[in-house]
Amino acid sequence: MKLISKNRHAYHDYQIDKEYEVWVILKWHEVKSIKANHVNIKDSIVRLDGKELWINNMDIPLYEKTSHALVPGYQPKGKRKLLITKKELAKVSSALDKSWTTIIPLEIFINKRGLIKIKIWVAKLMRKVEKKQVLKDRDIKTEMDREIKRLRV
C-alpha cells in the first residue's frame, strides 16, 4: 500500500465512528496526476446523493504532460463518483441519520493491485470544548509518561 495524500485536519476536527475503503472513478489523466502525488483532499467532503456517494472539492490538477486540447473544460475540483458495496452504503446512510455526523475522506492510497482507493470516515464533528479536552488529556498522559520514565532511572 502506497500512501498518496492524507487529510491531517480530519484527525483533529472529527471523531471516528466507522471507516470504509472505496474506489473512485477517475479519468486517465487524473490517475497519472494522482500517481505523481498531485492531489489535495484537505477541503473535500463526501456527499450521499440518492444511492450514490460523490466526493466534492478533491483537487486533482491536470497532469503536467497532458494537453489542454485533450481535456477541454477540465475542472480540478469537480465532482467524482465513489464506488461502494450496497451493504456498506446502507450502513453509511443509516449512520448519517444521527446528528453532527458527516463523511470525510481521510487518505488516498494505491493498494497492492495498483488500484487507487480512498479511505473515508463516517465521523462526528467535535466541538471546540471537546477538542480542548482531547488536547488536555493528551498533555496529561505525556506528563505522566515523563514522570514514570524519570522515576525508573
Image: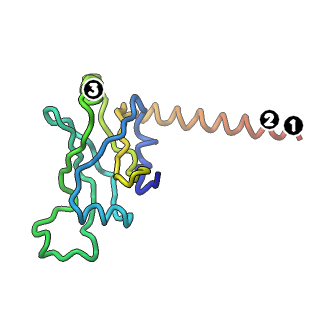
Give the mark, 3 or 2, whose residue is nearer the N terminus. 3
Give the mark, 1 or 3, whose residue is nearer the N terminus. 3
Q: Which mark is residue 87?
A: 3
Taking depth in this image into account, of 68 and 136 the one nearest to the observer is 68
Above or below residue 75? Residue 100 is: above
**How many marks are shown on the rendered structure?**
3
Q: Is residue 133 left or right of residue 147?
A: left
Instruction: Judge the density around disc 2: few (<14), some (14-19), many (≥20) Cα neighbours within 10 Å.
Output: few
Task: Read off the residue under disc 2.
Answer: 148
Label 2, secondary structure: give it: helix
Taking depth in this image into account, of 36 and 114 the one nearest to the observer is 114
Instruction: Judge the density around disc 3: few (<14), some (14-19), many (≥20) Cα neighbours within 10 Å.
Output: few
Residue 71 falls in image quadrant: bottom left
Taking depth in this image into account, of 1 and 112 the one nearest to the observer is 112
Whole-percent x and y of residue 65? Answer: 27, 77
Label 3 is placed on what type of residue? Lys
The furthest residue to the right: 153
Residue 145 falls in image quadrant: top right
Query: Residue at 18% across / 77% down in the picture?
Result: 67
Label 3, secondary structure: give it: helix
Above or below residue 35? Residue 109 is: above
Label 1, secondary structure: give it: helix
Asked whether the beta carbons under mark 3 and mark 2 sit within 8 Å of each other, the answer is no
Task: Read off the residue under disc 1.
Answer: 152
Query: Residue at 36% across / 63% down in the picture?
Result: 35
Whole-percent x and y of residue 7? Answer: 40, 49
Q: Which one is in front in this view, the residue at disc 1 or the one at disc 3? A: 3
Whole-percent x and y of residue 16? Answer: 42, 32
Query: Residue at 44% across / 49% down in the picture?
Result: 8
Asked whether the beta carbons under mark 2 and mark 1 sit within 8 Å of each other, the answer is yes
Above or below residue 31? Residue 70 is: below
Asked whether the beta carbons under mark 1 and mark 3 sit within 8 Å of each other, the answer is no
